[in-house]
Structure formats: C-alpha cells, structure tokens
Amino acid sequence: MPSTTNGIAIQATDIRKTYGSEVALDGVSLSIPTGTVYGFLGPNGAGKTTTMRLLTGLSRPTSGEVSIRGVSVDDRRDIASLIGYLPETPPLYEEFSAREQLEYVADLRDIPRSTARDRIDEYLDQFELVDDADRRISGYSKGMKQKTAFIQSVIHDPDVLFLDEPTSGLDPRAARRIRDSITEFADAGTTVFLSTHILPVVEAVVDEVGVLFDGHLVAEGTPAELHSRAETGESGTLEDAFLAVTSESNTETK
Ligand SMILES: Nc1ncnc2c1ncn2[C@@H]1O[C@H](COP(=O)(O)OP(=O)(O)OP(=O)(O)O)[C@@H](O)[C@H]1O
C-alpha cells in the first residue's frame, strides 16, 4: 500500500517512449492531485494512448518514472488494486454474458463472492443492463458493451480511474450514464484521468486539462486558464481553446 502520497494521485516524471526511431512521447511530466478529474486532450497520434499505457504500467517508458499514489507502477500487485483502466478497445469475452464477465473479473480481483454479487447487481441496475445481463455479450450493442467494460474497470473500487474515449460512439443516453458516473466517482474522491476527443464531455466534467501535441504537453491548467492562454475569452468554447493551443504548437514545431 502507498507509503507516501503527498496528495498526489498520478506522478509522471519526464517520461519518454520511443518505438524504433519514432518518438511517441518526448519528456512528459504530470502531477495530478487526488480527487481531480483530469481531461487529457490532443489530436490523433499525439501520444495519449501511449501515455495511458505508461501511467497504468502496461508499457514501460524508455526513460522516466511513474507512480500512482506514491506506488511505482513497476510494483504490479499494489498498482493493480489501486487503478482501474478502461482502454479504447476493452477486453470482453464475447461468449460470456455481462454477469459472467463481471463475476469473472471480480474473482480475478479477489473480491469476496457475496460482495461481488451485490456490487454487480447494483451496477447492472444503475447502467440499465439488468434485462440483458444473462445474454451473451456477442449480441450486445456498442453501448451495452461499453457499459459492461466501464463496470468491469470500477468493480474493485479503484482510487484512480483511467478512461480512454469512454463515450465515443455511444448514443446520448449511454454517454450521459457514463458521464454521470465519472462525476459520481469524482464526488466520492476517485481521481479520474480522462482521454477523449469529445470536448463537451471534457467541458462538463473536468477540473483540469492537459493538452498533448506531438509527444509534448503543450498546455495545462483549468479550462478557464486554457481559455485565457488561448485568448479565446469567456465566451469561447473549449474547442476554440484546444484549436488555438494546438495550432500555436504546430507553428512552433515547424
Ligand atoms: N506499438 C507501436 N509501435 C510503433 N509506433 C507506435 C506504437 N504505438 C504508438 N505508436 C506511435 O506513437 C504515436 C502516438 O500514438 P498514440 O496511439 O499514443 O496516439 P493517440 O494520441 O492516442 O492517438 P489517437 O487519438 O489517434 O488514438 C503515433 O505516431 C503512433 O504511430
């Protein structure tokens, strides 16, 4: 368990990742306080998924260090209980039903059977999956699969939740359910690291924003600070600020 956290949930120090001659991340540092909802933005190929894989310990940096609540991500056992990760393409067994999938993951995470059953029932109800919970996942819609995957990532009640495009391709009702859940988890003290291209979602739920461009963190702050830096003013949208900051960085890197 964490020896020291200093109120910081996610700490990354000068992380770099190269794939052969390709530099995917070029020295990114993050220090995200506990309880923050952090929106991670950047154009396609900026390095967001690479960053998430390094922050969750799924991939090792070429150099630099990452810790979650004071625990190095190399410490796999402790990290697994501290974090939840919803990747862009979530791992689900299509031949299972949602209930079987969630029971299986709860078992892997050593959650006592009766606690797991109660929690699964509660989540299935909350996400309006009760009627389909015993049907095979292979027959589910994208939204039903994504809701199952979201529950799977939070079933062990993690301290820090990493979400990669959690609402992309979902209908408004399913997207709203996931957005509301992000807010509920944050209200309960969970730190949420949210990567998405859907800026209205970011605008609705985040406390702080980081903008990644070409492997560099080019802007960071509250949405209001981003507006001020991008000189888009209070009436501008986050999309205006994002476009201003990334086109500014594009010019600088030319
Ligand atoms: N396994 C890999 N091998 C080689 N290059 C990779 C690998 N994974 C990522 N890259 C490269 O690293 C860069 C960053 O990719 P990454 O997937 O992290 O971007 P992203 O910001 O998540 O993009 P998107 O928004 O399109 O999902 C890209 O240039 C990509 O081609």
Image: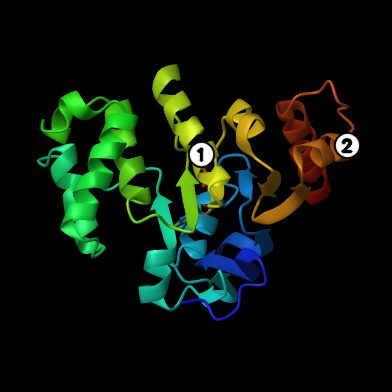
Q: Position of residue 156 (x, y in %)?
A: 34, 56
- Give the residue number, with chain letter if any, for mark 1: 184
Which of 53/254 is in front? 53
Q: Nearer the viewer, residue 137 or 98?
A: 98
Q: CA distance from mark 2 to mark 1?
A: 28 Å
The secondary structure type at the circle numbered 1 is: helix
| Residue density around tag 2, few if under 14, some if 14–19, many if 20 or more, within 10 Å | some
| Residue displayed at 61% across by 73% down | 5
123 vs 66: above or below: above
Q: Is residue 162 above or below residue 125?
A: below
The percent coordinates of residue 149 (x first, y second) are 31, 42
Quadrant in the picture for residue 139 = top left
Quarter-of-image position of residue 39: top right
* Residue 173 in the image, given as x and y percentages of width and height: 42, 19
| Residue type, label 1 | Glu
State whether residue 58 appears in this view. no
Identify the mark at residue 228; answer none if there is no mark. Answer: 2
Image coordinates of residue 18 in percent, x first then y, are: 54, 66
| Dot 2 and dot 1 residues touching (CB under 8 Å) | no
Q: Nearer the viewer, mark 2 or mark 1?
A: 1
Between 227 and 107, the one nearer to me in the picture: 107
Q: Is residue 12 visible?
A: yes
